[in-house]
Amino acid sequence: MKRAGMPSILIAVVLLAVGVTAEAQQPKKVPRIVYLASADPARDSTRAEGIRLALRELGYIEGQNIAIEYRYAEGKVDRAPELAAELVRLKVDIIVVAGGDPVIQAAKNATKTIPIVMVGPGSDPVEAGFVESLARPGGNVTGVTNLGRELGGKRLELLKEAVPKVARVAVLYDPAFRPSVIEVKEVLPAAARALELTIQPWQVRGTDDFERVFAALSKQRPDGLYPGGGPLMATNGKQIADFALKSRLPSMYYNREAVDAGGLMSYGADLADSYRRVAYYVDKILKGAKPADLPVEQPTKFELVVNLKTAKQIGVTIPPNVLARADKVIK
């Protein structure tokens, strides 16, 4: 009886060994992360690189144990729904959304199950309906919110402090970008009254519209320029900065890229820090955490950037007390 049972036992052992070997040889699933941005690759490359480096610090190496794909709306936010739908068909594991409300909304409309990590400028995510609360998002969206319009009053204050002669500020805004509309109607007027400034809102509906607005501004001659947030303004930051420089207009921006391009000043959340924080959310989700349970974070680091080269070109002297508070001074 014992001898008769031996072959069966040997066969079972061999089959088990073969099964274990086959399982060991099965390629391990590599998580697919997609970075969906409203900007173009050239302007967004530094931020995307910040996410890659932060992921590497956590042990995720692109091309080895994680795959990252990139999709760019290139300033045309009407393309966002199409790009988001494509990502859902690809069955990716996480969608990182950078670039404000329209892109976040497109991703949220496209899927209720794939985790979405938001970063960059945008509305209050609770007010916009992206999450139930900052502490308990409740759905498939979480990430970092950057307090874009809430800093509008501080920007006007810094502009006035840097250039005391400023009395009339032209505000450029995209009427399709909801946070800017709210800023122009609610936030900036109250701050302007306190600073004894006059706000002059100018709608810009597309890239082709800047030429018309610039021509009108050249005739009206305001004392300062304040471009609002959103993909349209960010994509055309260099064009806006060039106009301000040519017109000798002191200008205040949301982000430092416009100041690097020739704008006078910017004040806002440290976007590099916010983008690095994306890696934390990706890591937590890949380890099993649900977006619904990961609190949305607000920025803790802000930066003031001043371009002294531009100040000299437009005949402005920045007071020492403003320069002393600047995180970066371009000379």
Image (cartoon, rainbow, N blue to C red):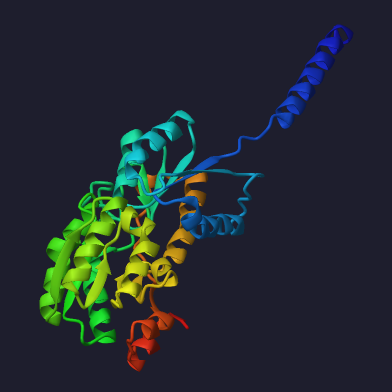
Examine the rendered structure and indicate whether residue 111 appears above or below residue 194: above
On the image, which quarter does residue 106 sit in? top left
Residue 36 appears anywhere in the view: yes
Examine the rendered structure and indicate whether residue 205 appears above or below residue 271: above
The residue lying toward the viewer, choosing from 52 and 256, is 256
Residue at 12% in and 70% down? 189
Examine the rendered structure and indicate whether residue 121 appears above or below residue 314: above
The residue lying toward the viewer, choosing from 122 and 74, is 74
Residue at 38% in and 34% down? 82
Point out residue 252 in the picture as x, y percentages from the top left corner: 30, 73
The residue lying toward the viewer, choosing from 63 and 181, is 181
Point out residue 157 in the picture as x, y percentages from the top left corner: 23, 80
On the image, which quarter does residue 261 sit in? bottom left
From this viewpoint, which residue is outermost toward the bottom?
320
Q: Is residue 224 left or right of residue 47?
A: left
Point out residue 232 in the picture as x, y percentages from the top left corner: 32, 54
Examine the rendered structure and indicate whether residue 5 appears above or below residue 118: above
Q: The N terminus appears in which quarter of the rendering?
A: top right
Residue at 30% in and 43% down? 105
Residue 138 appears anywhere in the view: no
From this viewpoint, which residue is outermost toward the right?
3
The residue lying toward the viewer, choosing from 253 and 209, is 209
Q: Is residue 68 left or right of residue 106?
A: right
Residue at 21% in and 67% down? 217
Point out residue 10 in the picture as x, y percentages from the top left corner: 84, 16
